[in-house]
Amino acid sequence: MSSSKIILVTGGTGLVGKAIEELVTSQKRENEKWIFLSSKDANLCDFKATKEIFVKHGPTHVIHLAAKVGGLFDNMSNNLDFLRDNLHINDNVLQASYETGVEKVVSCLSTCIFPDKTSYPIDESMVHNGPPHNSNFGYSYAKRMIDVMNKAYNQQYGCQYTSVIPCNVFGPYDNYNLKSGHVIPALIRKCHEVVSVGGNQFTVFGSGKPLRQFIYSKDLAKLFVWVLFEYNEIEPIVLSVDETSEVSIKQLAEEITKAFNYKGEIVFDITKADGQYKKTASNAKLRKYLPNFEFTPFSTAIKESVDWYIKNHLSARN
Ligand code: NAP
Ligand code: GDP
């Protein structure tokens, strides 16, 4: 097969990488060879290993997802690890891309790296406008540096390296570890455990009041492929559902119980942290480019994610 484009996806075995893999495999795309890397293929904290895997595959394009990723409670305990691992991974991937002549790189920021004290909605122009929330400052500063590096690689060498800013992501192949996982996989696992033993107390951490925008990994996968081939700015772009789709953690918990047909009590454990109250992001820039993009309705996406977990919980990452 002759492939004019070789697309290397770092972090290709994670939540977002798996969704992109399923999408491009289902589309049978012409003249594209997609390679999905795991940490077993190369430890991207190490420059030599990173350069070797880039030389081996010779990518023309890179979707850079690999990162130390975790939920609120993991970040709160390990800010130094989040800072150092992500600084190393990002520096290595961008420098190896430059040294091996990659045409385009799309890296990943997150709406949780935005300033804590801010006006709402937050947009792409505000990434560096003040300190991030204290709970995840390590991850946030490392991620913010991607945007700084993209600008520097462009200014000094003319590289087309850009970044996207997704809101909270969820879907199949998530991380269901209760210590390191995000809220949706954690609550899906906890509700499944309650339902499995016929229990009637489903515990949600915090007050349930914080607000979040959640994007289904399958929708994000489509947007990533669009950014890779159609979006030509160096400046980042927010990939989020609309502001009107923001939900509270309480509403999220109710949606999960509906998907499990669980009728018992939902208990809010207010001894646990709430984290950032909200990080409402504007997707106006995305809407300008793709006014008709349809996000999967939240309840449909939650139901599909719950059904996937019920089917796959024995082999799911936990
Ligand atoms: P994930 O499920 O935790 O997957 C992380 C991926 O990175 C895995 O493929 C993992 O490989 C790889 N990886 C981790 N450390 C590595 C290392 N040292 N060397 C090589 N590979 C390494 O993460 P995700 O949720 O898909 O996140 C993908 C991207 O989206 C990340 O950049 C994250 O910051 C960003 N993001 C995520 C969210 C969210 O809510 N999940 C929201 C906004 C932005 P193994 O499978 O081998 O461990
Ligand atoms: P964040 O969006 O970056 O803060 O990260 P998370 O995905 O971990 O979401 C954290 C929010 O969900 C906070 O308001 C938590 O109090 C709440 N939450 C409720 N139950 C859980 C849980 O079991 N695990 C996690 N990670 N968060 C939970």
Image (cartoon, rainbow, N blue to C red):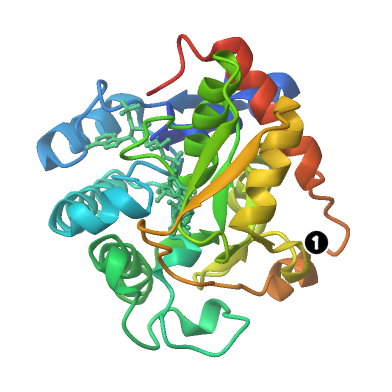
Hey, which quadrant is residue 54 in on the image?
A: top left
Q: With respect to residue 286, does 59 lie above or below?
A: above
- Residue 5 picture location, percent across and down: 54, 34
Ligand 1 is found in which quarter of the picture? top left
Q: Is residue 130 left or right of residue 222?
A: left
Q: Is residue 87 left or right of residue 174?
A: left
Pointer 1 residue: 290
- Residue 119 picture location, percent across and down: 55, 90
Q: Residue at the spot x=34%, y=47% of the render? A: 101
Q: Quadrant of the N terminus?
A: top right
Q: Is residue 224 left or right of residue 100?
A: right
Q: Residue at the spot x=52%, y=69% of the render? A: 236
Q: Quadrant of the C terminus?
A: top left
The amino acid type found where label 1 is placed reads Leu
Q: With respect to residue 306, does 249 lie above or below?
A: below
Q: With respect to residue 64, does 191 lie above or below?
A: above
Q: Residue at the spot x=28%, y=24% of the render? A: 56
